[in-house]
Amino acid sequence: MRNLVTHSLVLAGLILPGLQSPVSADNDARDYIPMEPGKTLIATYFNHISATDFYNNGDKTSDDVNLSANIGIFRPVYYTKIGPFVMDPQALIPFGNQSLDGDGVGGVEVSSSGLADPIVTATIWFVNDPASKTWLGFTPFITLPLGEYDEDKSLNLGANRWAFKPEVGFVKGFGNYFFELTGNCEFYTDNDDYTSQSVTLEQDPVYTLESHLSYNFTDAFYISGDYFYHNGGETTVAGIDQNDEKDDHAVQLSLGFLLNPSYHLLLKYKTDIKVENGLKTNTIGLRIAHFF
C-alpha cells in the first residue's frame, strides 16, 4: 500500500507546476496598483511550463521527467468603490492541457486537459494614494473544486478540494521605480477521493513571499525583476507523511508594454532556482489586458 500511495503521490505532485499559475496565483508586477472605480479589465494569460529535473530533499533524483503544460487563464476584473475603499471583484478561470512521461516516472505517459479549478476574489485597498505612489491591499482568494478531476487518472487539472488564501500586497513608487512586497498563506481542505484507492490527501498550508522591482523606461514600457519564495505544504496520504514540503525559490523577468490606451501586453520568463521537493520548472508567459 505504501508503494502504491507514494507512486501515486509522485504522479499527482508533478501536476502542481502546471497548475502553479492558476492555483497559487502568483502575482505580476503592479497587480496591486488599482485602476479607477468604474473601470473594467479583461485579462487573458498563456503560460507554457516545462520541466525535466525532479528533486527530493534538495537533491536531483532524476533528469528524465518530462512535463509539458499549456495553461490559459481568463480573468475579468471590475473596479468599484464601497464607502472609502476601492475594490475589484474578479474571477480567474484556468484551463489548458498537460502531459507527463519519462523514465523518471516509470516510463508512463499520462495527460490531462480541460478546465482547472476557478478562483474568485476581490482586493480591498486600505491605502490608495496615487499622489504618493503608495498602495496597500488585502485579497482573500477562494479556489473552487470545479476543475477536471478523475480519481482513476494520475494527472488532473482539478484538485478536488477547496483552497483559501488570504494575501496582503504593498506597493511604493519612487520616481520611475516601483517596489512591491506581497505575502500570503494558502490553506487546503482534504481530498477524500485521491487515487483509485479513494484515500485521503491532506496538505499543510503553503506560505509565499514575493517581491517585484520595476522601472519605467517610458510611459509605455517597463521592466520588472520578480522573486518568489514558497515554503511548507507537506502532504499526507492515507495517514502517511510524504516528506515533500516546499522550500523553493524562483525568479522572473517581466516586460510590460502599453500597446495603446486600451491594451497592455506583459511578457515574462520564470525559472526555479532552488527546489526542495518536486519539479524544477521553466515558464514562458504572456498576458494581454484590455481595459475600458
Image: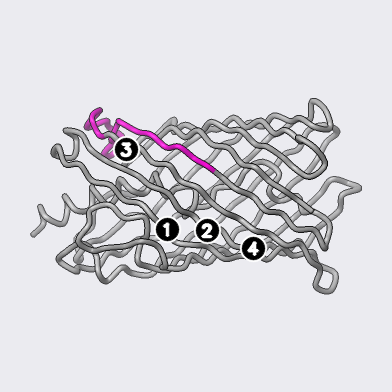
Most extreme residue toward the bottom is: 83
Amino acid type, residue under disc 3 in the picture: Leu
Q: CA distance from mark 4 to mark 1?
A: 18 Å
Label 3 sits on residue: 67
Amino acid type, residue under disc 2 in the picture: Ile
Main secondary structure along the magenta-highlighted residues = strand
Residue 291 image position (x, y, % from top left): 76, 51
Mark 4 or mark 1: name the one nearer the start of the chain.
Answer: 4
> Which corner quadrant holds the N terminus?
bottom left
Q: CA distance from mark 3 to mark 4?
A: 30 Å
Contact flag, marks 3 and 1 (Cβ < 8 Å): no
Label 1 sits on residue: 115
**Front-most of residues 289 and 213:** 289
Mark 2 or mark 1: name the one nearer the start of the chain.
Answer: 2
Label 2 sits on residue: 93
Q: Is 284 within the magenta?
A: no
In this rendering, which labeled residue sits more in front, label 3 or label 2? 2
Q: Quadrant of residue 174?
A: top right
Helix, strand or loop status at disc 1: strand
Mark 3 or mark 1: name the one nearer the start of the chain.
Answer: 3
Q: Residue at x 19, y 53 (%)?
A: 8
Q: CA distance from mark 3 to mark 1?
A: 18 Å
